[in-house]
Image (cartoon, rainbow, N blue to C red):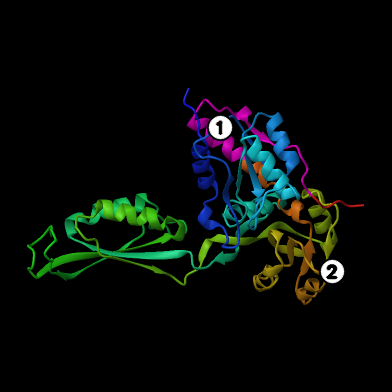
Amino acid sequence: LKKMKLSNILSILEEMAPLGYAEDFDNVGLLVGNQEAEVSGVLVCHDALEAVIEEAIQESCNVVVCFHPIIFSGLKKITGKDYVERAVLKAIKNDIAIYAVHTALDNHPNGVNQLFCNALGLTQTKILIPKAHYIYKLTTFTVPENVQKVKTALFAAGAGKIGNYEECSFVSEGTGTYKGGDDSNPVIGNRHELMEVKEIKIEVTFEKHLHSKIIKALVENHVYEEVAYEVVSLENKHQNIGLGMIGELPQEMEEKAFLEMIKEKMQCGGIRHSAYLGKPIKRVAVLGGSGSFAISAAKNAGADVFLTADLKYHQFYESENQMIIADIGHFESERYTKNYIVDFLKEKITNFAPALSKSNIVLSKENTNPVKYL
């Protein structure tokens, strides 16, 4: 049977949640482990605490995929003095890899906030805060007979995707000039000869995390010895990637009944919320985890209620009697994430190699929510 290495698992996880989607402050990806290690099993959890690492040992899993990164800021020492260091020490001692997805999955259109919306039955969902500085544009120039080869390679590498459309590009015709130096080997013309040739300009957009892949595809499929190209960052926001979501209930609900429904669906120990406004709930904004920064975005989007977590006292005032703000709990707002990861891995891994079966993908039974309710 074909053996599965950790590097194979990493490729699947990055397909599920590209690391480029993560916020700059985050610490996602492989935190502990050797990519060449052979995988015996994968345990999926919310937080990779010491008890979870022990669970992985008992389940014969040498890979732990967690939502929250157990290592968030830098570790200068690993002495076991706190819960982070104890978990990392136990993982290293037992050859267990740790991989975190966090905001890479938060920003994904099928990720944390879509799962949140699905649990509430919301329809017509869209990103609440589209990701900025994530769309790049490539401009390159080549001879007419090379255009199709270059475009095909760029599209295969992921360029030219705009919303629900693929293979988007713009092509225009012009005249290019060049003169090769002593060490040049021009495809058309000779050294030291000023050339004027008919060239085609190709323009495509692509997502930031694909940058190196796009340039590699361009260079490998271009006929010129020196490939002329430009890459610029666009001001356009990526409408399909970003934090939070907003959608609509199939039928509007009375405020108290809506929050009671949330408490049941998300299994909340309690809900802290701003004052009722005496109007029905139809348009719902959500942001799993700490989401106080999105209050104004939810208001501007016309939300009747904004569901998130980790709100401070004065932030409830920011509703300005325009919508209800509700803190449903950090863990609770993200509770369906690990189930999604398990389902994704089971589908992808069993298609990849029979050496690792669905039974080797384990959903952690540990409740890592540090917040308890009286």
Q: Is residue 300 left or right of residue 242?
A: right
- Taking the spot 78% from the left edge, 68% from the top edge, the residue there is 324
Q: Please, what is the three-letter code of the amino acid marked with disc 1?
A: Val
Q: Please, what is the three-letter code of the amino acid marked with disc 2?
A: Tyr
- Taking the spot 78% from the left edge, 56% from the top edge, the residue there is 329
> Residue 49: x, y in percent?
73, 44
Which numbered disc flags the more N-terminal residue, 2 or 1?
Answer: 1
Q: Which residue is mark 1?
A: 39
Q: Height in image: 171 above or below 370?
A: below
Q: Which residue is mark 2?
A: 276
User: Under tag 1, what secondary structure?
Assistant: loop
Of 335 and 42, nearer the camera is 42
The reply to whether residue 48 is visible in this rendering is: no
- In magenta, the rendered stretch is 342-369
Q: Residue furthest top?
A: 1
Q: Is residue 93 magenta?
A: no
